[in-house]
Structure formats: C-alpha cells, structure tokens
Image (spheres, coloured by chain):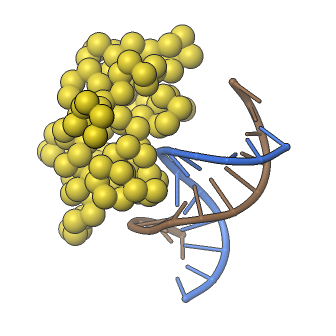
Chain colours: A yellow, B blue, C brown
Amino acid sequence: MVAPSRYQCIYRVVRQIPRGRVATYGQIADLAGLAGHARQVGYALHALDDGAHAGKAVPWHRVINAQGRISLRGDYAGDIQRQLLEREGVELDARERIDLKRFRWRPRTRRV
DNA sequence: ATGATGACCCAAT
DNA sequence: GATTGGGCCATCA
C-alpha cells in the first residue's frame, strides 16, 4: 500500500480535464501546486498502470508533453493513448503531434 | 547511503 | 527541426 498524498493532487487536476481537451505535464504540475516538477506528474501517471491507483478514472491519456506529442512513444500504451484522444475528437498530426493552440485545456478561462 | 533511470521542461547550439 | 546540457524529484538496484 502507498501513501500518494502528493499524487492525489495531481490526479485531482488531471480528472478535471474535460473530454476532447489535453494538458501538458508542466501545466498539470503548475495547477497541482508542483510548479517546475513536471517529471513527478509523469511519474504519478505511470503509477496508474500498476493498478495501485486504478479505479480513480483518471484520464491520463489527456496528458501530453509540452511538444504536443505523446511521451509514451515506442510503448504500446502510446498507441492506446492516441486512439483514446482521437476517439474524443482530438486531432493528431501526421507526425502524431497535437496542436496545443487548439486542444490545450484552459482552466479559469478569460485571462487569469 | 549512493548511483542510475525516468509517461518532463527549458534554453542554447 | 534535432541534439545537448542543466534542473527538478520519486523510485529502484
């Protein structure tokens, strides 16, 4: 068993990402109060696969890197993530790149 | 305890 | 655009 109190805040933010939108690791870290620690976000999401945090219904597939690409490139899970995103209406480039200008989730819209 | 690795990000080259 | 180097921190051997 684990005490992922730190992961909790990350999952809480990820869970707020609406369908059809994506967010970057850095963005999640910032919203979770872990600004500058984007790596921990990715690490937290990786823990989901372990099943320890399964059942939280965390839309991990809506989290991508700052380049607008899927970090799981090379892994089979990356293929799943791409399919999940496309299923939600997120359009991917021929090079599997997402236009963040269009699909990036903006919490508290309307300039701060 | 140390050292290496990682679903990252940024700036410089 | 691709590559390199520095930074952050949790997890594993």
- In the image, residue C12 sits, relative to residue C3, either above or below, namely below
Which residue does the image show at 40% across and 38% down from the upper left?
A24
Report whether residue A24 is seen: yes
Task: Using residue B11 as the reference point, say whether residue A73 is left or right of it.
Answer: left
Label count reads 0
Taking depth in this image into account, of A104 and A59 the one nearest to the observer is A104
Q: Position of residue C9 (x, y in %)?
A: 44, 68
Q: Position of residue A60 (x, y in %)?
A: 30, 38
Report whether residue A52 is seen: no
User: Where does the N terminus of chain A fall, quadrant-wise?
Assistant: bottom left
Taking depth in this image into account, of A35 and A42 the one nearest to the observer is A35
- In the image, residue A43 sits, relative to residue A80, either above or below, namely below
Which residue does the image show at 36% across and 27% down from the upper left?
A104
User: Where does the C terminus of chain A fall, quadrant-wise?
Assistant: top left
Q: Position of residue A52 (x, y in %)?
A: 23, 55
Taking depth in this image into account, of C8 and A43 the one nearest to the observer is C8
- The residue furthest front is A111
- In the image, residue A42 sits, relative to residue A15, either above or below, namely below
Which residue does the image show at 44% across and 15% down from the upper left?
A92
- In the image, residue A97 sits, relative to residue A70, either above or below, namely above
Task: Using residue A94 as the reference point, say whether residue A34 is left or right of it.
Answer: left
Quadrant of the rendered image containing residue A105: top left
Q: Position of residue A10 (x, y in %)?
A: 27, 52
Which residue does the image show at 20% across and 28% down from the upper left?
A18
